[in-house]
Every structure is written in structure tokens, then in C-alpha cells.
Image (cartoon, rainbow, N blue to C red):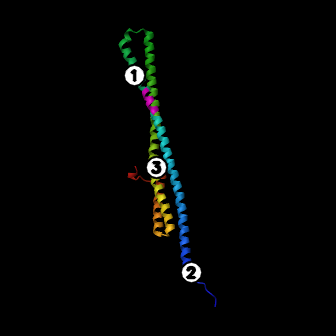
Amino acid sequence: MAEVEVPNIDELKEDRANSFTKRVALCTALYAVMLAICSLGGNHATKEMMLAQQQASNQWAFYQSKNMRENLYRMEKDRIETQLLERKETMKPEILKHYLAMQKKAADEEMRYGAEKKEIEQEARKLSIERDTNQAKDPYFDYGEVMLQIAIVTSSISIISLSRPVFCFSIVAAMMGVFLTLNGYLMFFRIPFFH
């Protein structure tokens, strides 16, 4: 009769634990990759938010400068109009011609600065919207990173303790982290307390 070797129960338990440990370690590595992607998105959103804020501030400063110049030319035009109303009848024709040319130049400059100001305002508003969009994305990446870090820690604990419930908790935390990360990139919805 042939000898049949009966497996050792301790070896089977060790093989099962080893298999569990390998699967959990693989999931932990996957969590780390997701965390890196989340971190990249968060860093990019923060950088773009700060850049857009700086550019918007520059545009609004430029807008303010154009607005001041427009008002200066408006005041100059009004001052010349007032002088013409006061002294038009007593002015020599060449001086009157000079005043009218100055008035026209001031009016033209006022219109030019007004038109340039509107273009600058549109660009500044566009940059402000870009800043606000990236600012809205940032919390999702932050919370996504936290959830993925919790998932990594809990899956590491499950390896040490060979605890399946702790590993299941790490899966739930990782899924929440991935969901928040995807929302940070794609903005499917807004969570009110994040803003």
C-alpha cells in the first residue's frame, strides 16, 4: 500500500496566512499608487489656484490703473469743457481750436482706456473663475489623501494582526479616498462642508 502524506495543519494555516499577507501587501502597494495620484492632483490644484490668484491680482491691478487713467482723462475733458463754457466767446480762434483739440484728445483717451479696461476685466474674471475652480477641487484631494493614508495604515495593521475585518476597513477607506480623488479631478458633485 502506498504511503499518503497527510498535510500538517500548522503548515496549512501558515500557507493561508502567507497568502492573505501577500494579497494585503499587493493591495497596500495599490493604495500607495492611488495616494501618489491623489497627491499629484492636490499639488497641481494648489499650484494652479495660486498661479491664477496671482494672475488675477495682476489683472485687477492693471484694471485699476486703467480705470484711474480713464477717470483722469474724464476729469481733464470736463475741466476743458468748463473752461470753454466760461470763456469760449472771448477766446481767440487759434486758442479755441487748441482747446477743442485738447478736449477731443481727452475724450478719445477716456474711451480708449474704458475699452482696454473692459478687456482686462474679462481676463481678470476668467482667472478668478479658474482660481475658484481649483480652490473647490483642493479639499477633495486633501480628504482623499487622508482616506488613502488611513487605508495604507490599516492594511499594514491587518498584515501584522492577520485581521480580515481590519483589511475590509482599509478597503472601504481606500474606496472613499479613490472616490474623493476622482471627484477632485472631475468635480461630479460638491460636498457643502468642504467649501
Label at residue 75: 1
Q: Position of residue 27 (x, y in %)?
A: 53, 64
Q: CA distance from mark 2 to mark 1?
A: 99 Å
**Type of amino acid under label 2:** Asn
64 is within the stretch colored magenta:
yes
**Direction from residue 111 to residue 34 in the image, left or right:** right
Q: CA distance from mark 2 to mark 3?
A: 54 Å
Q: Position of residue 98 (x, y in %)?
A: 45, 13
CB under 8 Å between discs 1 and 3: no
Q: Is residue 16 above or below residue 87?
A: below
Query: Which residue lies most toward the bottom here?
Result: 1
Question: Foreground: 105 or 194?
Answer: 194
Q: Position of residue 180 (x, y in %)?
A: 46, 56
**Type of amino acid under label 1:** Met
Q: Residue at the spot x=55%, y=74% of the render?
A: 14
Quarter of image, res 74: top left
Mark closer to the chain start, 1 or 3? 1
Q: Position of residue 135 (x, y in %)?
A: 45, 46
**Type of amino acid under label 3:** Asp
Tag 1, which secondary structure?
A: helix
Number of the front mark, 1 or 3: 3
Q: State the predominant SS element of the stretch in magenta.
A: helix
Question: Foreground: 9 or 164?
Answer: 9
Per the rendered image, the range of residues in magenta is 61-68
Label at residue 138: 3
Q: CA distance from mark 1 to mark 3?
A: 46 Å
Near mark 3 (Cα within 10 A), the count class, few <14, some 14-19 or many ≥20, is many
Label at residue 8: 2
Number of the front mark, 2 or 3: 2
